[in-house]
Image: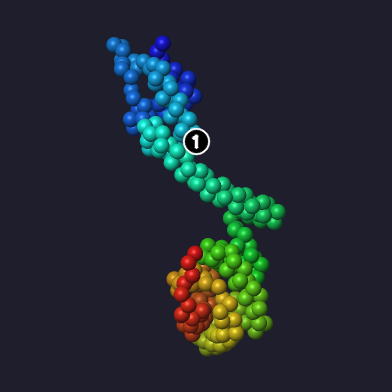
Amino acid sequence: MAWSTRQLADLAGVTLRSIRHWHDIGLLPEPERLTNGYKQYGARHLILALRISRLSGLGFALDDVARMLASQEYGQESLHGLRAELDTTIGRLERIRTEIDELIRLGVSPDLSTEALVAMETLGRDPASRDVAIILSHLMPREDMVALVAVLEGVPEELKSINTAILELPAEASEDEIVTLADRAATELKTFIAVNYGTFPDIGGSRVSADVVGVVATENMNQAQRRVMRLIQDQLPVEPRGQQPRRDR
């Protein structure tokens, strides 16, 4: 008995597109055509189509399917490789499920990672703090984010007062006001960094990452506020943590 391409696809439980694609890549040999030009498939084509469908359904790439059809030994090797990939995928999906459960429990927007939420507990929930939390959660692993929050929770009242003064600084502030505020902030920050030296986590491991945080933090600031932030940055050490080697992620 012979079947048409559509009948073969129906019997094998696959689409016409799959049969044609398998032909195109040489995985399923094309049968001879009748005088009217129609293909006629036999039992060997059906069995081969079922084997291909089975292997691709397990998640094997078609290149691997071709090798497995040609070698039983390669099939066993591929099974071990696929098993390892599945372990990795399952682990990733379980982590995502745990994070989704946590976001559902907290009732927060899914665009915020749990790491960003940790940062916002200290930074605040205003739009600017939210943006900084998002970029920090991208640059830092969760354990470093927790460490950063612990450090920020110890920020002295004077620094908090300075931060408020910067956020309230009008765009038309004089240069004297800007310089005075920047010098005051830099002095307090240097002291804070010195006291907490060694406890600051690595923000991305480079000055580039620190600059990115700075750009995000100042995005919505006026000209005077940005001028203060630049002056503060100019007075701070390039590497607050010293010349410690970057940690591998």
Q: Amino acid at mark 1?
A: Leu
Q: Where's residue 175, x and y in %? A: 50, 86
Q: Is residue 73 above or below residue 148?
A: above
Determine whether, in the image, residue 21 is placed left or right of residue 241: left
Judging from the image, what secondary structure is the residue with disc 1 in? loop
User: Residue 160: in sight, yes or no?
Assistant: no
Instruction: Provide residue 233's location: percent of width, then percent of height.
Output: 49, 80
Q: Nearer the viewer, residue 211 or 27?
A: 27
> In x, y percent, where is residue 169?
58, 79
Residue 107 appears in which quarter of the rendering?
Answer: bottom right
Q: Which residue of the protein is positioned furthest toward the right in this rendering? A: 105
Name the residue tied to disc 1.
58
Tell whether 6 sits left or right of 232.
left
Residue at the spot x=56%, y=51% of the render?
92
Compared to residue 10, the image places residue 247 above or below, namely below
Query: Can you say whether 191 is above or below 38 in the image?
Result: below
> Who's the residue at 38% across and 34% down the image?
71
Position of the N terminus by quadrant: top left
Which residue is at a point 49% across and 70% down the rendered structure image?
A: 247
Looking at the picture, does residue 220 appear above or below residue 25? below
Residue 3 lies left or right of residue 111; in this view the side is: left
